[in-house]
Amino acid sequence: MKYIKKIQMLLVACVLPAIGCAQAQLSPEVARSMVQVRRDLSNTKAQLERTSATLRDIEKNPRLNTEQQIGFFREEMVKLEQAIQQVRDVRMDMETKSEEYFEAWGAEMGKMEDQQLAAAAKARRDASMQAVKAVQAKLEEVSTTGSPLMSGLRDLDRYFEHDETAEGAQAAVPTIQRTLGLKDPVIWKIDEAIAQIDQVTQSVE
């Protein structure tokens, strides 16, 4: 019910010139959730870079006492896991709010007697749903591309939990190199998701 008034205003906007209708793609609640996803994606990207830097230090600048280097990596891994979970939680919130919003929008359309207005509303709703789905698709690409990288990072975290020696670090170098080689594609996918969110949210400002 909280969306009904907003939906009614949006339905009226759909008979105005195209620019007015283009500005009403999302509810404020959905838009805010999407902006938060963007913020958390950016934070995750930065944390991924920091975590990778600690691994690169182990690979490129091994010390006789690697315990501190490995400790830095494991501390950054905890932060990375927290950042990823935050993205998951906010993404779920965004998707829930989107479903509620579009369901309310559809219910209001079903009550309309003016068929021309109903058709305009349907076109706008369909376009708005596609905008959200485009963001969701980009977020799924981040998840899919990031899965092998996170698998490698988690394996290294488990490995170093029981072996913090210089010899152990040296034995892990091939895995470190393979894992770090997976990072850039994930960064690119995060950037694409952020750009997609910007494209959608800027249209509702």
Image (cartoon, grey):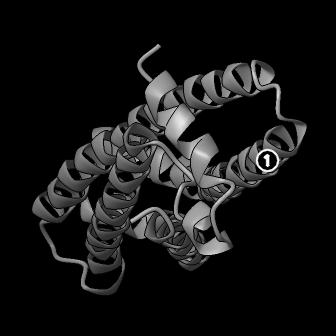
Q: In the image shown, does 119 or 190 lie closer to the viewer?
A: 119
94 vs 201, nearest the viewer: 201
How many numbered discs, if any?
1
In terms of secondary structure, where does tag 1 sit?
helix
Does residue 87 appear left or right of residue 72 in this picture?
Answer: right
Q: Vertically, is 136 above or below 3?
A: below
Q: Quadrant of residue 106?
A: top right
Say whether residue 174 is visible: no
Locate the C terminus and report the quarter of the image it occupies: bottom left
13 with respect to 65 (left or right): right
Measured as percent of width and height from the top left, residue 36 is found at 33, 50
The residue under the point 37% across, 67% down is 45
The residue tagged 1 is 126
Q: Residue furthest top?
A: 1
In x, y percent, where is residue 123? 82, 51
Residue at position x 54%, y 55% from top?
24
User: The residue under label 1 is which amino acid type?
Assistant: Asp
Front-lying residue, 174 or 183: 183
- Relative placement, left or right, of 94 versus 63 is right
Q: Is residue 94 above or below residue 148?
A: above
Count residues near mark 1 (Cα–Cα under 10 Å), then give few for <14, some for 14-19, many for 20+: few
Residue at position x 81%, y 42% in the image:
122
